[in-house]
Amino acid sequence: MSISFFGMRRAESQKSLSEIVFRNIKLYSIKMAEKIRSHYIPKFYLEGFLSPLKRKPTLYLYEKGNSEIRRASPEDAAVIKGYYSIDSPQSNIDENIVENILSLVESYSAPVIRKIKNKEELNNDDRENFSVFLGYMLTRVPQHRKMTEDLSAKAAKSLLMAQASHKEGFEVLLKQYEKDTGKKINYPVEKLRRFLMDASKYDFKAHPNISLTLMHTAIELAPIFIEMNWSFWGATDESKYITSDNPLYYFDRTAPSHEGAGLINKNIELYFPVSRDIMFVGSWHNISGYRKSDSNNVRGWNKNTIIFALRFVFASQYSEGLNRIVQRYIDSAPKVEVIWGGKKM
Protein backbone atom coordinates (compact mmCIF):
# COMPACT_ATOMS: atom_id res chain seq x y z
CA MET A 1 0.00 0.00 0.00
CA SER A 2 1.30 3.48 -0.79
CA ILE A 3 0.61 6.95 0.49
CA SER A 4 -0.67 8.43 -2.76
CA PHE A 5 -0.57 12.22 -3.09
CA PHE A 6 0.32 12.73 -6.71
CA GLY A 7 -1.72 14.50 -9.32
CA MET A 8 -3.72 16.33 -6.65
CA ARG A 9 -4.10 20.01 -5.89
CA ARG A 10 -2.53 21.28 -2.68
CA ALA A 11 -5.66 21.28 -0.54
CA GLU A 12 -6.65 17.86 -1.81
CA SER A 13 -3.23 16.34 -1.11
CA GLN A 14 -3.25 17.63 2.46
CA LYS A 15 -6.76 16.35 2.94
CA SER A 16 -5.70 13.00 1.52
CA LEU A 17 -2.91 12.77 4.08
CA SER A 18 -5.36 13.53 6.89
CA GLU A 19 -7.71 10.82 5.65
CA ILE A 20 -4.91 8.25 5.52
CA VAL A 21 -3.68 9.21 8.97
CA PHE A 22 -7.23 9.15 10.33
CA ARG A 23 -7.68 5.59 9.11
CA ASN A 24 -4.55 4.46 10.94
CA ILE A 25 -4.34 6.58 14.07
CA LYS A 26 -6.58 8.71 16.21
CA LEU A 27 -6.20 12.30 15.01
CA TYR A 28 -8.28 14.09 17.59
CA SER A 29 -8.32 13.37 21.28
CA ILE A 30 -8.05 15.03 24.65
CA LYS A 31 -4.66 16.72 24.95
CA MET A 32 -2.06 14.44 26.45
CA ALA A 33 -0.63 15.62 29.76
CA GLU A 34 2.95 14.52 29.08
CA LYS A 35 4.98 15.40 26.02
CA ILE A 36 6.68 12.44 24.35
CA ARG A 37 10.33 12.06 23.36
CA SER A 38 10.54 13.04 19.73
CA HIS A 39 13.18 11.69 17.37
CA TYR A 40 13.84 14.41 14.82
CA ILE A 41 15.95 11.79 13.03
CA PRO A 42 14.11 8.42 13.04
CA LYS A 43 15.51 5.71 15.28
CA PHE A 44 15.22 3.00 12.60
CA TYR A 45 17.17 5.22 10.20
CA LEU A 46 20.03 5.81 12.66
CA GLU A 47 20.34 2.06 13.11
CA GLY A 48 21.74 1.99 9.59
CA PHE A 49 24.81 3.89 10.83
CA LEU A 50 25.78 1.64 13.72
CA SER A 51 29.26 0.17 13.87
CA PRO A 52 29.32 -3.42 12.59
CA LEU A 53 30.57 -4.81 15.90
CA LYS A 54 28.56 -7.92 16.74
CA ARG A 55 28.79 -7.65 20.52
CA LYS A 56 27.85 -3.99 20.93
CA PRO A 57 26.98 -2.00 17.80
CA THR A 58 27.71 1.68 18.48
CA LEU A 59 26.70 5.01 17.03
CA TYR A 60 29.38 7.69 17.32
CA LEU A 61 28.19 11.23 17.83
CA TYR A 62 30.25 14.23 16.68
CA GLU A 63 29.14 17.69 17.76
CA LYS A 64 30.20 20.96 16.18
CA GLY A 65 31.94 23.09 18.77
CA ASN A 66 32.57 20.12 21.07
CA SER A 67 35.72 18.10 20.44
CA GLU A 68 34.56 15.12 22.51
CA ILE A 69 33.48 12.11 20.44
CA ARG A 70 30.64 10.39 22.25
CA ARG A 71 29.00 7.01 22.01
CA ALA A 72 25.26 7.02 21.59
CA SER A 73 22.39 4.70 20.76
CA PRO A 74 19.68 5.26 18.15
CA GLU A 75 17.21 5.25 21.02
CA ASP A 76 18.79 8.27 22.71
CA ALA A 77 20.32 10.18 19.78
CA ALA A 78 18.56 13.02 17.94
CA VAL A 79 15.84 13.34 20.59
CA ILE A 80 14.07 16.46 21.91
CA LYS A 81 11.19 16.09 24.32
CA GLY A 82 7.94 17.42 22.89
CA TYR A 83 9.68 18.70 19.75
CA TYR A 84 6.60 18.09 17.57
CA SER A 85 3.96 18.94 20.17
CA ILE A 86 1.37 21.45 18.97
CA ASP A 87 0.52 24.30 21.32
CA SER A 88 -3.22 24.65 20.71
CA PRO A 89 -5.94 26.34 22.80
CA GLN A 90 -8.43 23.78 21.46
CA SER A 91 -8.84 21.06 24.05
CA ASN A 92 -9.83 18.40 21.51
CA ILE A 93 -6.60 18.60 19.46
CA ASP A 94 -4.05 15.91 20.19
CA GLU A 95 -0.80 17.81 20.68
CA ASN A 96 1.08 14.79 19.34
CA ILE A 97 -0.71 14.65 15.99
CA VAL A 98 2.47 15.63 14.10
CA GLU A 99 4.39 12.88 15.87
CA ASN A 100 1.68 10.42 14.85
CA ILE A 101 1.86 11.50 11.21
CA LEU A 102 5.65 11.12 11.19
CA SER A 103 5.32 7.65 12.70
CA LEU A 104 2.91 6.71 9.92
CA VAL A 105 5.28 7.98 7.22
CA GLU A 106 8.15 6.05 8.80
CA SER A 107 6.11 2.84 8.89
CA TYR A 108 5.59 3.05 5.12
CA SER A 109 9.19 4.02 4.34
CA ALA A 110 11.10 1.54 6.52
CA PRO A 111 10.33 -1.44 4.21
CA VAL A 112 11.50 0.62 1.22
CA ILE A 113 14.81 1.42 2.90
CA ARG A 114 15.27 -2.29 3.64
CA LYS A 115 14.78 -2.99 -0.08
CA ILE A 116 17.35 -0.32 -0.95
CA LYS A 117 19.87 -1.82 1.46
CA ASN A 118 19.32 -5.17 -0.23
CA LYS A 119 19.67 -3.53 -3.67
CA GLU A 120 16.21 -4.65 -4.74
CA GLU A 121 14.21 -3.05 -7.53
CA LEU A 122 11.71 -0.42 -6.37
CA ASN A 123 8.15 -0.36 -7.68
CA ASN A 124 5.95 2.74 -8.06
CA ASP A 125 4.55 2.41 -4.54
CA ASP A 126 8.08 2.23 -3.15
CA ARG A 127 9.07 5.39 -5.02
CA GLU A 128 6.02 7.26 -3.75
CA ASN A 129 6.57 6.24 -0.14
CA PHE A 130 10.29 6.96 -0.22
CA SER A 131 9.62 10.38 -1.83
CA VAL A 132 7.25 11.33 0.98
CA PHE A 133 9.85 10.14 3.50
CA LEU A 134 12.52 12.29 1.82
CA GLY A 135 10.21 15.29 1.94
CA TYR A 136 9.76 14.93 5.68
CA MET A 137 13.47 14.29 6.21
CA LEU A 138 13.98 17.75 4.77
CA THR A 139 11.25 19.58 6.68
CA ARG A 140 11.14 17.82 10.07
CA VAL A 141 14.71 18.53 11.22
CA PRO A 142 15.85 21.43 13.45
CA GLN A 143 17.76 23.08 10.60
CA HIS A 144 14.68 23.44 8.40
CA ARG A 145 12.39 24.38 11.29
CA LYS A 146 14.89 27.02 12.40
CA MET A 147 15.13 28.44 8.87
CA THR A 148 11.33 28.47 8.53
CA GLU A 149 10.85 30.29 11.83
CA ASP A 150 13.69 32.72 11.10
CA LEU A 151 12.24 33.53 7.69
CA SER A 152 8.74 34.02 9.13
CA ALA A 153 10.06 36.33 11.84
CA LYS A 154 12.18 38.36 9.44
CA ALA A 155 9.33 38.61 6.94
CA ALA A 156 6.99 39.88 9.67
CA LYS A 157 9.57 42.42 10.77
CA SER A 158 10.14 43.59 7.19
CA LEU A 159 6.39 44.04 6.70
CA LEU A 160 6.08 46.04 9.92
CA MET A 161 9.03 48.24 8.94
CA ALA A 162 7.47 48.82 5.51
CA GLN A 163 4.18 49.84 7.13
CA ALA A 164 5.97 52.16 9.58
CA SER A 165 7.91 53.83 6.75
CA HIS A 166 4.67 55.47 5.49
CA LYS A 167 3.57 57.98 8.11
CA GLU A 168 -0.03 58.52 7.01
CA GLY A 169 -0.63 54.84 6.26
CA PHE A 170 0.79 53.84 9.63
CA GLU A 171 -1.55 56.21 11.45
CA VAL A 172 -4.52 54.75 9.55
CA LEU A 173 -3.33 51.24 10.42
CA LEU A 174 -3.18 52.04 14.14
CA LYS A 175 -6.63 53.61 14.12
CA GLN A 176 -8.01 50.53 12.40
CA TYR A 177 -6.33 48.33 15.01
CA GLU A 178 -7.89 50.30 17.85
CA LYS A 179 -11.29 50.10 16.16
CA ASP A 180 -11.08 46.35 15.53
CA THR A 181 -9.76 45.39 18.96
CA GLY A 182 -11.25 48.07 21.16
CA LYS A 183 -7.80 48.59 22.64
CA LYS A 184 -6.20 52.03 22.91
CA ILE A 185 -2.52 52.42 22.05
CA ASN A 186 -1.32 54.75 24.80
CA TYR A 187 1.97 55.63 23.13
CA PRO A 188 2.95 58.55 20.88
CA VAL A 189 2.30 57.41 17.32
CA GLU A 190 5.34 59.12 15.79
CA LYS A 191 7.64 57.80 18.49
CA LEU A 192 6.31 54.27 17.93
CA ARG A 193 6.70 54.63 14.17
CA ARG A 194 10.34 55.72 14.42
CA PHE A 195 11.06 52.92 16.88
CA LEU A 196 9.67 50.30 14.50
CA MET A 197 11.73 51.65 11.61
CA ASP A 198 14.97 51.01 13.50
CA ALA A 199 15.65 47.28 13.03
CA SER A 200 18.40 47.29 15.66
CA LYS A 201 16.02 48.11 18.51
CA TYR A 202 13.79 45.03 18.46
CA ASP A 203 13.38 41.58 17.02
CA PHE A 204 10.70 39.01 16.23
CA LYS A 205 10.47 35.37 17.25
CA ALA A 206 8.15 33.06 15.33
CA HIS A 207 5.89 30.62 17.17
CA PRO A 208 7.00 26.97 16.76
CA ASN A 209 3.55 26.12 15.40
CA ILE A 210 4.54 27.94 12.20
CA SER A 211 7.29 25.48 11.36
CA LEU A 212 5.13 22.55 12.48
CA THR A 213 2.42 23.61 10.04
CA LEU A 214 4.83 24.23 7.16
CA MET A 215 6.51 20.89 7.81
CA HIS A 216 3.80 19.28 5.70
CA THR A 217 5.08 21.02 2.57
CA ALA A 218 6.94 17.71 2.43
CA ILE A 219 3.87 16.39 0.62
CA GLU A 220 4.34 18.99 -2.11
CA LEU A 221 8.04 18.19 -2.46
CA ALA A 222 7.40 14.48 -2.93
CA PRO A 223 6.13 14.73 -6.55
CA ILE A 224 9.36 16.54 -7.48
CA PHE A 225 11.51 13.83 -5.89
CA ILE A 226 9.61 11.00 -7.57
CA GLU A 227 10.19 12.50 -11.02
CA MET A 228 13.96 12.65 -10.54
CA ASN A 229 16.36 9.97 -11.70
CA TRP A 230 17.48 7.91 -8.72
CA SER A 231 20.85 6.30 -8.18
CA PHE A 232 22.22 4.50 -5.14
CA TRP A 233 25.98 4.53 -4.60
CA GLY A 234 27.65 1.82 -2.55
CA ALA A 235 30.44 2.73 -0.14
CA THR A 236 33.84 1.04 -0.13
CA ASP A 237 35.39 -1.29 2.41
CA GLU A 238 37.70 1.52 3.54
CA SER A 239 35.25 4.46 3.53
CA LYS A 240 31.69 4.45 4.90
CA TYR A 241 28.99 7.10 4.73
CA ILE A 242 28.03 9.28 7.68
CA THR A 243 24.80 11.16 8.37
CA SER A 244 23.73 14.20 10.38
CA ASP A 245 20.89 16.10 12.01
CA ASN A 246 20.20 17.58 8.56
CA PRO A 247 20.79 14.54 6.34
CA LEU A 248 19.00 15.52 3.13
CA TYR A 249 20.63 18.34 1.19
CA TYR A 250 20.80 19.58 -2.37
CA PHE A 251 22.79 22.05 -4.44
CA ASP A 252 23.82 22.99 -7.95
CA ARG A 253 27.47 22.12 -8.46
CA THR A 254 27.65 24.48 -11.48
CA ALA A 255 26.53 27.56 -9.51
CA PRO A 256 28.62 29.79 -7.21
CA SER A 257 28.49 28.55 -3.63
CA HIS A 258 26.67 31.66 -2.39
CA GLU A 259 23.74 31.24 -4.79
CA GLY A 260 20.60 29.32 -3.91
CA ALA A 261 19.10 26.71 -6.20
CA GLY A 262 15.60 25.33 -6.67
CA LEU A 263 14.75 21.65 -6.87
CA ILE A 264 13.56 21.86 -10.48
CA ASN A 265 16.86 23.39 -11.59
CA LYS A 266 18.20 20.98 -14.23
CA ASN A 267 21.65 20.93 -12.54
CA ILE A 268 20.36 20.27 -9.03
CA GLU A 269 21.55 17.17 -7.18
CA LEU A 270 19.81 15.77 -4.12
CA TYR A 271 21.81 13.75 -1.58
CA PHE A 272 20.65 11.51 1.25
CA PRO A 273 22.80 8.89 3.03
CA VAL A 274 20.51 5.87 3.33
CA SER A 275 22.95 3.91 5.52
CA ARG A 276 26.67 3.60 6.16
CA ASP A 277 26.84 1.59 2.93
CA ILE A 278 24.53 3.48 0.53
CA MET A 279 24.11 7.09 -0.63
CA PHE A 280 20.97 8.14 -2.49
CA VAL A 281 21.44 10.69 -5.26
CA GLY A 282 18.50 12.26 -7.08
CA SER A 283 19.08 14.38 -10.16
CA TRP A 284 17.71 15.34 -13.55
CA HIS A 285 20.69 13.69 -15.24
CA ASN A 286 20.34 10.33 -16.93
CA ILE A 287 21.93 8.35 -14.10
CA SER A 288 20.01 5.67 -12.23
CA GLY A 289 20.25 2.28 -10.56
CA TYR A 290 22.64 0.76 -8.03
CA ARG A 291 26.25 1.77 -8.57
CA LYS A 292 29.61 1.46 -6.86
CA SER A 293 31.33 4.56 -5.58
CA ASP A 294 35.00 5.09 -4.74
CA SER A 295 36.68 6.36 -1.58
CA ASN A 296 37.20 9.86 -2.99
CA ASN A 297 33.49 10.24 -3.69
CA VAL A 298 32.53 8.86 -0.28
CA ARG A 299 34.87 11.29 1.47
CA GLY A 300 33.62 14.21 -0.63
CA TRP A 301 29.97 13.42 0.06
CA ASN A 302 30.73 12.97 3.76
CA LYS A 303 32.32 16.43 3.80
CA ASN A 304 29.12 17.89 2.33
CA THR A 305 27.07 16.03 4.96
CA ILE A 306 29.19 17.75 7.62
CA ILE A 307 28.86 21.17 6.00
CA PHE A 308 25.06 20.95 5.87
CA ALA A 309 24.78 19.60 9.43
CA LEU A 310 23.37 22.04 11.95
CA ARG A 311 25.00 20.59 15.06
CA PHE A 312 25.40 16.80 15.10
CA VAL A 313 27.08 14.26 12.82
CA PHE A 314 26.47 10.52 13.28
CA ALA A 315 28.90 7.84 12.15
CA SER A 316 29.65 4.15 12.54
CA GLN A 317 33.31 4.75 13.29
CA TYR A 318 35.43 6.55 15.86
CA SER A 319 37.74 8.90 13.97
CA GLU A 320 39.86 11.82 15.18
CA GLY A 321 40.33 12.83 11.54
CA LEU A 322 36.57 13.01 11.01
CA ASN A 323 36.23 15.01 14.21
CA ARG A 324 38.74 17.58 12.97
CA ILE A 325 36.67 18.10 9.84
CA VAL A 326 33.48 18.44 11.90
CA GLN A 327 35.11 21.12 14.08
CA ARG A 328 36.29 22.94 10.97
CA TYR A 329 32.72 23.50 9.80
CA ILE A 330 31.03 25.06 12.81
CA ASP A 331 28.12 27.30 11.80
CA SER A 332 28.30 26.13 8.17
CA ALA A 333 24.65 25.09 7.75
CA PRO A 334 22.57 27.18 5.29
CA LYS A 335 20.96 30.35 6.63
CA VAL A 336 18.04 32.54 5.63
CA GLU A 337 18.83 36.13 4.72
CA VAL A 338 16.36 38.98 4.34
CA ILE A 339 17.63 42.28 2.95
CA TRP A 340 15.99 45.57 3.99
CA GLY A 341 17.36 48.93 2.90
CA GLY A 342 20.53 47.28 1.61
CA LYS A 343 21.23 45.66 5.00
CA LYS A 344 20.85 42.10 6.24
CA MET A 345 18.20 41.65 8.90
Image (cartoon, rainbow, N blue to C red):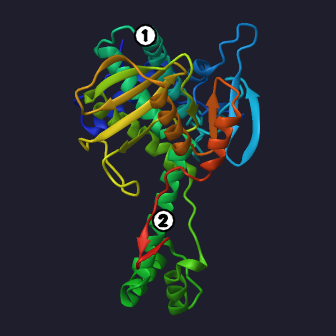
Q: Nearer the viewer, residue 208 or 278?
A: 278
Specify whether residue 257 is in view: yes
Which image quadrant is residue 256 in? bottom left
* Left or right relative to 150: residue 120: left
Residue to which mark 2 is pinned: 154
Residue 3 on image: x %, y %: 36, 21
Residue 43 on image: x %, y %: 61, 23
Please name the amino acid that badge 1 sits on.
Lys
**Quadrant of image for the N terminus:** top left
Helix or strand or loop: what does disc 2 sit on? helix
Which image quadrant is residue 85 in? top right
Specify whether residue 35 is in view: no
Q: Nearer the viewer, residue 191 or 259?
A: 259
Q: Residue at x 57, y 18 (%)?
A: 48
Residue to which mark 1 is pinned: 115
Q: Residue at x 59, y 49 (%)?
A: 329
